[in-house]
Image (spheres, helix red, strand yellow):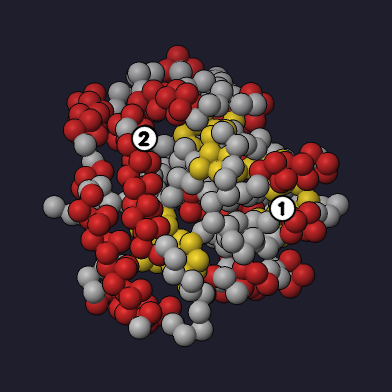
Amino acid sequence: MSSQSWRVGEKEHEYLKAVLENGFPGSSSVSFTGRLEKLFAEKFDSKYAISFANGTATLHAALAAAGVGAGDEVIVPPLTMSSTSFAVLHCGAIPVFADIDPETFLMSAKSVKERVTQKTKAIMPVALYGLCPDMDAINAIAKKHKLAVIEDDAQCFLGKYKGKVAGTLGDMASFSFQNSKHLTCGEGGMVTTSNLDYAEFIRRFSSLGYGNVSAAPGKSKINKSDIVNPNFARHVSLGYNYRLSELCSAFLFAQLERLEMFVEWRKKCAAGFAEAVKGVSWLKPQKTPPECENSYWAYAVKLDTPDVKWVDFYDKFMELGGDGFYGAWRLTYTEPYFSKIIPDKHAHCPVAEVTQPYLMQFKTNYGSEADIKRQAETLQKTIRHFDK
Ligand SMILES: Cc1ncc(COP(=O)(O)O)c(C=O)c1O
């Protein structure tokens, strides 16, 4: 049994079986996709939730809905998975990198303000590791300059900012269901918004520009009566086939029913690691400001001493029986492809540059007290080794 099998319950099997037994009858069947979107919208306090094949396509669609196109600029953080910036490029626009806050590791509103130009069209804050950035400050900048705000909440499920759930803080928000996320179906994504125009655009964008789809739950396909008509005109705009499959929706619906439980386990794991690093002056965990609730996709810690190398810490953690941790992604603008195309003036984030190499991302997807205890104790032993 793999250590991740706890994430798959009886309902996942039951709903998948229902899809298989139904035999993919066509577009008019009652769908798990519809049930999934309805429940997601409810749980994330949004009027609309539109499912996607992944959490990169979601960003592409949300940016397109905001009218982002060739030559526009979109402000993004450099410390994130590169999909955030790829989606900007998919629209023909230019990612402009704002620096991060040294304590929260999140895009700093002060830096965002400095990056706004006549060409800026949108801001895409990332709720990195499960923590929302300072959204009031970011929204104020957006309002002043008439910019769209798209939350990249791929890593943030039920994280909160001033009591509001992530997904309701900007104009639109994007979630991912890739393997490592709080909820998964292998690959998948969701956009939330409470704006009908955005929602209708996003649905059409994800569904090959079909004219008769809608933002309503599951309404991503053409009716049977229309399909059979040889004169039926389908495509009213440019679209992609970004839809989530019914099998993935069924699996994900079962996961979504247990969302709160998955988030609680993440928080318990984080609490175990937090206890282990408490009082250690040379380890700086991601700071969660009092107005935020971190949903802990990962427990991130900065190694803040010249005396211990990242790789030595990693090796010792493994040697002592740890389950491993991840380094942070290279800053997006330093990735080979991006460094070729991003002008130097858009790629200078000194705080991110002295933070990224020293970050350790501890996994929080353990589903037993014993596993959590083991990882936290191993971290403690590793710390003691270097503290000597
Ligand atoms: C912050 C962030 N944005 C976007 C994505 C892209 O999501 P996906 O892998 O579902 O395309 C991910 C993760 O995978 C992510 O962590």
Q: Quadrant of residue 352?
A: bottom right
Q: Which residue is at the far front? A: 279
Report crowding for label 1: few under 14, some 14 to 19, many 20 or more residues within 10 A (C-alpha).
many
Name above or below for residue 255 compared with residue 324. above
Q: Quadrant of residue 264?
A: top left
Name above or below for residue 232 compared with residue 193. above
Name above or below for residue 65 compared with residue 301. above
Q: Which residue matches tag 2?
A: 259
- Residue 284 in the image: state x and y as whole percent: 50, 66
Residue at position x 22%, y 48% in the image: 368
Query: Which circle's residue, 2 or 1, is located before the other in the chain?
Result: 1
- Residue 376 in the image: state x and y as whole percent: 30, 61
Q: Which residue is at the far top? A: 225
Residue at position x 68%, y 69% in the image: 349
> Label 2 sits on what residue type?
Leu
Q: Secondary structure at mark 1?
A: helix
- Residue 194 in the image: state x and y as whole percent: 61, 26
Residue at position x 54%, y 56% in the image: 287
Name above or below for residue 173 compared with residue 385. above
Q: Can the viewer see residue 227?
A: no
Give left or right: position of 41 versus 116: left
Disc 1 Cβ-to-ligand 1 distance below 8 Å: no
Specify the label residue 384 is tagged with. none
Q: Which residue is at the far right? A: 118
Is 59 in front, or is 81?
81
Residue at position x 45%, y 41% in the image: 157
Give left or right: position of 209 versus 243: right
Q: Secondary structure at mark 2?
A: helix
Q: Which residue matches tag 1?
A: 109
